[in-house]
Image (spheres, rainbow, N blue to C red):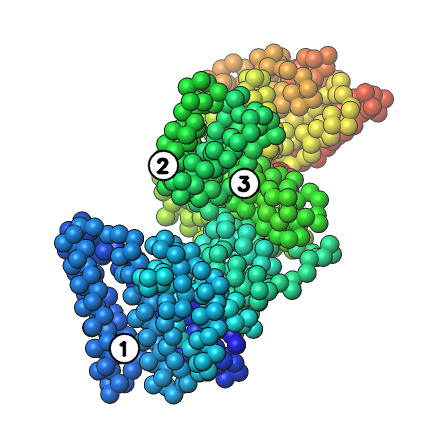
């Protein structure tokens, strides 16, 4: 015999009941079955709500009852032909008359006891099961309605009664021995005490009814039919990549259910688990889907690939911490604590205690926090007055996340992976609990981090094939647009070869910004600023933080002095930063160190390779040298692709002003070319290299030997070009003096003996800096290891494409 239970959504209306009928038809063709049904979806809650209205003399209960009556009358009309309806319509009306009489009594007395609440709540299942039984009998099935309340006997703890298991099982076995119908239909959730007063089995009561009947008769299988295709690896409302679990052990199912998985209620599993009866969770609306088998036959092997079976979560949690030096080594403290909570009927969800015995931390439902605080402080009042313990400390707004799996105990490093991926995403853990069985690691975190944590853990343990990365790009100009194009073009390669999926989750320029958690589609990118919202650095930053997505990278592709001001705030939320912008790394040394330390302390990355040499691996080379124990002693470099382009092309055939204008037109200069020609940009770059090499240099300590007349630096960019033309003879003389010596002009940077300088130099043909063409850069490192033959990095040091590719490489490196 099989036991089938259908939940409230499965019997919510006539269309859903037709699905149920087909399932019953199929199963009853092969087996005798007992079918347990819940009340129509939402009916029990509405019955209780109406009773609460009546208890405060609010006659709104009448309209609720009328709607419920109409709902059941309509169901009869849709399930039965006209000739069969009369008696069943009368049946519904009679019982709603009885219900209304009960509510009238509640209204008059102004009182709603647990006993009356159970009586009221039992009507939902009573009505639904009778109507469904009538439908099956009309369709010709060998079907009998069984009142499970007559058979399931409990104590008189109304609303959450405890079952007398021995008597209940005896009653069920005897009833099913006498009644041999192919199909038995029965209401779930309902029972009776020894005086035949109606009681209910609490949350998940219909599952419990089905489990009790299955255990009593040693059923072949218990089937729980619901609106999802079994248990999932995570809550699909939190992660779009949740997967069905095809097979799971009883213990794993209990752990997942305890910590929030809504498909099963833990006590309902206990009777069938004790009798080693298989349990299947199936989808009423997709009956051919395999569902989840909860089995006692499941074997765990060290060779099993899957470490965990699921991630579950529970919200609205409060942490209670009782601590004090008077607790150390004193027996009975824990017993007193749990006894006072038990007296208030407060369920303890999670417990953790340090080996010092100085404190005990408990997780409870947030709604119980005030009652728990009062109970504990009252119980420990004398100890609190004597300063042996402190008043209980309460933290609200928390959630529990649990990683569950039998196979976790056979694998080392599971906890490290779990805490590592959470830490790398800035998720702070408030409490940790792990049982000796090692099948569950539970953590308490902020409610605000729940979606992020579930997705991070699910990705780490169930989606290792693809890592979702969320990019927030600030700056969509020349370099930014090239970077975006590269991301779209390269993403398929990254998915297939590096198992990374880049999502552009946010874009901002100086005017507009837009966000899309699932990524801005390529076809929508060109029109994004048409429907973006008004942009500000503050709003862009706050939105990134509030969305709190895993594996987030903030990319600054601007020259704005405002944007680096938000770096520290983002790093403190463990958001990786990739900066093309040089301002942060060349700011005050203490600020530079603060940003580097903040990134390290919050397990994230701050990369700015393109600050020097565009896409050349200059900063990365320094970092590798330092990490391997080498020391940079001197640096000689041409660091401006703009200036190199200018002096490579200034040969007297064009004016200096024309060559600079050409460099700007081809995209080699900053928007204001004076930043390049003044040497400020080069000074920033050598400063950054010196700092990365370990020298605490400040910007104003760099000697800058300018070749530009002071007048060229006055006014706007248009005036700048006018002045360049006026001083053409000055630039010709610079060129002539170099040519007279058989040399060429190069704007160089030098760091040596802890000091740095930048300026225009005459370069001889024998120098490594001589053969440098176009917009190329060169950096020459002298180190302890590279003392006789220096280490040289050379290549294109300017241009939107190569700079974008350098930013792209930093993005990949940061994740």
In the picture, the disc for residue 76 is 1
Q: Earlier in the sequence, mark 3 or mark 1?
A: 1
SS label for mark 1: helix
Q: Is residue 748 left or right of residue 126?
A: right
Tell me: residue 65, above or below residue 4: above
Q: Quadrant of the C terminus?
A: top right
Rate crowding at label 2 as few (under 14), some (14 to 19) or many (20 or more) other CA atoms within 10 Å.
Answer: few
Q: Which mark is residue 443?
A: 3
User: Residue at the location (76% across, 21% down)?
Assistant: 631
Q: Is residue 392 left or right of residue 641?
A: left
Residue 173 percent coordinates (x, y) = 48, 73
The residue located at (68%, 35%) in the rendering is 616
Q: Is residue 30 above or below residue 740?
A: below
In the displayed structure, does residue 9 sit left or right of residue 679?
left
Gap between marks 3 and 2, in whole Å?
24 Å
**Horizontal and vertical percent for residue 292?**
55, 65
- Give the residue number, with chain letter if any, for mark 2: 371
Task: Say whether residue 268 is visible.
Answer: yes
Q: Nearer the viewer, residue 700 or 597?
A: 597
Mark 1 or mark 2: whose residue is earlier in sequence: 1
What separation in Å lies between label 1 and label 2 (alpha carbons)? Answer: 45 Å
Residue 432: image x %, image y %?
56, 38
């Amino acid at each position: 015999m099989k036991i089938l239970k259908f939940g409230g959504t499965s019997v919510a209306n006539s269309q859903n009941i037709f699905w149920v009928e087909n399932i019953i038809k199929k199963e009853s063709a092969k087996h005798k079955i007992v079918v347990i049904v819940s009340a129509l979806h939402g009916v029990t809650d509405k019955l209780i709500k109406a009773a609460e209205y009546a208890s405060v003399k609010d006659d709104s209960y009448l309209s609720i009852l009328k709607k419920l009556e109409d709902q059941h009358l309509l169901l009869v009309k849709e399930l039965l032909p006209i000739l069969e309806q009369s008696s069943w319509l009368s049946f519904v009306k009679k019982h709603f008359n009885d219900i209304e009489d009960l509510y009238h009594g509640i209204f008059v007395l102004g009182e709603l006891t647990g006993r009356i609440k159970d009586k009221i709540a039992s009507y939902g299942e009573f009505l639904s099961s009778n109507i469904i039984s009538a439908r099956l009998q009309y369709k010709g099935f060998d079907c009998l309605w069984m009142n499970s309340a007559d058979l399931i006997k409990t104590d008189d703890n109304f609303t959450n009664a405890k079952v007398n298991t021995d008597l209940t099982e005896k009653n069920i076995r005897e009833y099913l021995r006498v009644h041999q119908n192919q199909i038995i239909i029965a209401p779930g959730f309902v029972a009776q005490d020894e005086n035949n007063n109606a009681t209910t089995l609490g949350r998940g009561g219909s599952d419990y009814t089905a489990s009790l009947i299955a255990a009593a008769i040693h059923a072949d299988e218990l089937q729980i039919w619901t609106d999802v295709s079994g248990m999932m690896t995570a809550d699909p409302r939190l992660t779009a990549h949740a997967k069905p679990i095809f097979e799971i052990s009883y213990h794993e199912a209990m752990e997942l259910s305890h910590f929030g998985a809504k498909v099963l209620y833990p006590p309902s599993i206990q009777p069938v688990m004790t009798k080693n009866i298989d349990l299947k969770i199936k989808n009423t609306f997709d009956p051919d889907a395999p569902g989840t088998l909860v089995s006692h036959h499941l074997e765990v092997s060290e060779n099993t690939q899957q470490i965990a079976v699921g991630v579950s979560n529970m919200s609205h949690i409060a942490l209670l911490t009782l601590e004090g030096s008077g607790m150390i080594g004193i027996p009975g403290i824990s017993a007193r604590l749990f006894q006072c909570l038990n007296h208030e009927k407060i369920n303890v969800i999670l417990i953790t205690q340090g080996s010092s015995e100085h404190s005990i931390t408990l997780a409870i439902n947030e709604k119980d926090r005030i009652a728990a605080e009062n109970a504990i402080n009252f119980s420990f009042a004398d100890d609190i007055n004597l300063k042996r313990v402190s008043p209980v400390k309460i933290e609200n707004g928390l959630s529990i996340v649990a990683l569950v799996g039998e196979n976790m105990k056979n694998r080392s490093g599971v906890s490290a992976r779990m805490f590592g991926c959470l830490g790398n995403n800035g998720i702070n853990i408030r409490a940790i609990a792990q049982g000796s069985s090692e099948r569950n690691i539970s953590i308490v975190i902020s409610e605000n981090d729940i979606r992020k944590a579930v997705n991070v853990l699910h990705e780490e343990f169930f989606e290792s094939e693809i890592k979702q990365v969320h990019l927030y790009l600030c700056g969509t100009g020349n370099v930014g647009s090239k970077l975006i194009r590269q991301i779209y073009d390269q993403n398929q390669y990254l998915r297939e070869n590096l198992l990374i999926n880049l999502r552009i989750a946010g874009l901002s320029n100086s005017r507009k910004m837009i966000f899309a958690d699932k990524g801005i589609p390529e076809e929508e990118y060109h029109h994004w600023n048409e429907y973006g919202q008004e942009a500000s650095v503050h709003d862009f930053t706050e939105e990134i933080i509030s969305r709190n997505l895993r594996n987030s990278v903030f990319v600054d592709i601007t020259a704005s002095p405002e944007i680096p001001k938000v770096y520290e705030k983002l790093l403190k939320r463990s958001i990786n930063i990739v900066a093309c912008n040089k301002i942060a790394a060349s700011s005050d040394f203490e600020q530079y160190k603060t940003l580097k330390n903040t990134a390290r302390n919050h397990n994230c990355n701050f990369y700015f390779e393109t600050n020097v040499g565009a896409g050349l691996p200059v900063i990365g080379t320094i970092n590798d040298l330092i990490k391997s124990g080498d020391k940079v002693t001197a640096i000689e470099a041409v660091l401006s692709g703009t200036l190199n382009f200018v002096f490579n092309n200034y040969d007297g055939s064009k004016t200096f002003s024309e060559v600079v204008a050409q460099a700007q037109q081809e995209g080699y200069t900053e928007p204001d070319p004076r930043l390049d020609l003044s040497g400020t940009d080069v000074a920033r770059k050598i400063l950054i290299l010196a700092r990365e090499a370990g020298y605490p240099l400040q910007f104003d300590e760099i000697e800058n030997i300018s070749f530009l007349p002071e007048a060229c630096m006055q006014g706007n960019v248009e005036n700048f070009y006018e002045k360049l033309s006026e001083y053409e003879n000055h630039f010709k003389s610079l060129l002539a003096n170099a040519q007279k010596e058989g040399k060429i002009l190069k704007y160089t940077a030098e760091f040596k003996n802890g000091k740095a300088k930048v300026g225009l130099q005459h370069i001889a043909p024998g120098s490594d800096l001589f053969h440098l063409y176009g917009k190329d850069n060169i950096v020459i490192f002298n180190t302890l290891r590279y003392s006789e033959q220096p280490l040289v990095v050379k290549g294109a040091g300017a241009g939107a494409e190569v700079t974008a590719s350098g930013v792209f490489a930093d993005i990949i490196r940061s994740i």
